[in-house]
Amino acid sequence: MSYLDHFKLNKQPFRLTPEPGFVYWSKQHARAKAYMESTIWLADGFVVITGDIGSGKTTLLKSFLAQLDDDVVCAMVSQTQLTPTQFLQAVLTEFGFKPFNKRKVELLHVLNMFLIEQYSSGKKVLLIVDEAQNLSRRVLEEIRMLAAVEPHGDKILRIVLAGHADFRNTLDSAELKQLLQRVRLRFHIEPLNRPEMHEYIDHRLTVAGCGPNKIFAEASYETLYRYTGGLPRLINILCDAALLHAFSDDDDVVMNDHVMSAVAELNWNEHESTTGRFTQLREIAHRPVAASCVTEIEVREDGRTVAVHSFPMGRIILGRSPDNEIYMKSKFVSRHHAQLVSDDNGCLIEDLNSTNGVFIGEKQVKIHRLRDGDIVSLGVHELVYRDLRAVRNSGDEGAKQDASGSAVDHRDDQSGESHAV
């Protein structure tokens, strides 16, 4: 006997595989779908849909695809870690071609001829790119050029780009200014709020065949929200595990204890969006630190502070390997990505032959002497550098001014000047 029989369900309600029939149309998801639908009758620009991991983007895309009319020819590309040539091959493959022995110029010719042929036949052509955050700038530029095909002044190719939250930063970069000017609509899907999560769970249970009886006790919803932050994928995982725990206890209702047992088994912490953890971390940035510490590094991910580290003089390594002093779990960060060397003159950052490089603003650097407040970019992570000696000196000078009642301008040729090495 499975838990489906136990709870009198026809289908598994919380599968992770995207299923259009289970889509819950929150106001946000409905608006995102309306934006995508607008590409069918307005072909003059891109539509960009972003959201946190697990926010339901792929499910939304599949539901949208299932409802397209017969006069729409669509290609959906989900494998996006490709070169420009490989990307063109992937698009043509989705349109039914076998383009693997062609050069790039031949691929472009075939695709352009296909678009013009579809236009002449009265068809609308749609390209959907999922996981767009993995696209290189060269591929994004290729996509921009594809959108420029316009016989008789009419745009042919309609384009929807969907990606994780950090794709917004990519689009806003100076290098993609021309692409951004072609974006007509962009929308970011936020996690579900507490009432929406309640409706989402009830909706999926109803689609799965649940009758009028409540399967989840009312008290369990608060705990579910606390540990999932309203992200649909996390909701599915935790609800499915809680159902299994209730089934193993031969209970007809999922109680709060079942949810907590599932949390313990999954080894989850409360979701950061519901705990204010990032606010607490920002406060840590102003905490007292040891007098021996001269360097402070605030680590940000997608604009949110995730850690603050303080270090004395010497060398520290940062990267994806847990043995580093600054550990960043990201596929964009190399195992030993860079080193920071703090000395009497400040702090140097040096790239340790990483795959994706070290950037100060838009400039890639090999070795660079940091200034107080510099922001170093490594993939989706940012490192904000603070010179604790400058902070302490500023505080000391402020105290002197308060004591004397006069403002004194203390300048030192060594205090703020530093140069790239």
Image (cartoon, rainbow, N blue to C red):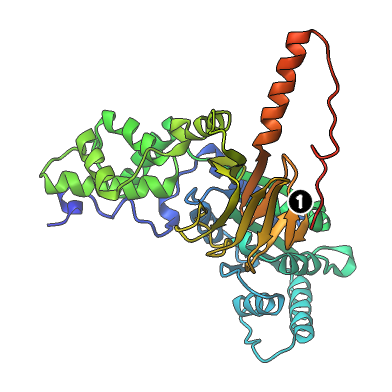
Vertical relation: 200 (above or below) 208: above
Assign the C terminus to one quadrant of the image: bottom right
Corner quadrant of residue 194: top left
Corner quadrant of residue 412: top right
Q: Residue drawn at (44%, 33%), measured in percent from left and top?
A: 274
Assign the N terminus to one quadrant of the image: bottom left
Q: Residue drawn at (76%, 49%), measured in percent from left and top?
A: 184
Structural crowding at the residue carrying mark 1, measured as other residues with C-alpha within 10 Å and reported as few (<14), some (14–19) or many (≥20)? few
Q: Can residue 29 be seen in this view?
A: yes
Q: Camera-side residue: 188 or 117?
A: 188
Q: Camera-side residue: 298 or 379?
A: 298
Considering the numbered disc 1 on the image, is that residue within a helix, a strand or a loop? Answer: loop
Pointer 1: what residue?
A: 361
- Residue 216 percent across, percent down from the top left: 25, 36
Residue extending furthest toward the right:
152
- Residue 68 percent across, percent down from the top left: 58, 60
Residue extending furthest toward the top:
405
Residue extending furthest toward the bottom:
101
Residue type highlighted by circle 1: Gly
Q: Residue drawn at (60%, 43%), measured in percent from left and top?
A: 297
- Residue 344 percent across, percent down from the top left: 70, 45
Vertical relation: 271 (above or below) 396: below
Q: Can residue 31 be seen in this view?
A: no
In-image side of 327 versus 34 (left or right): left
Q: Camera-side residue: 69 or 258?
A: 258
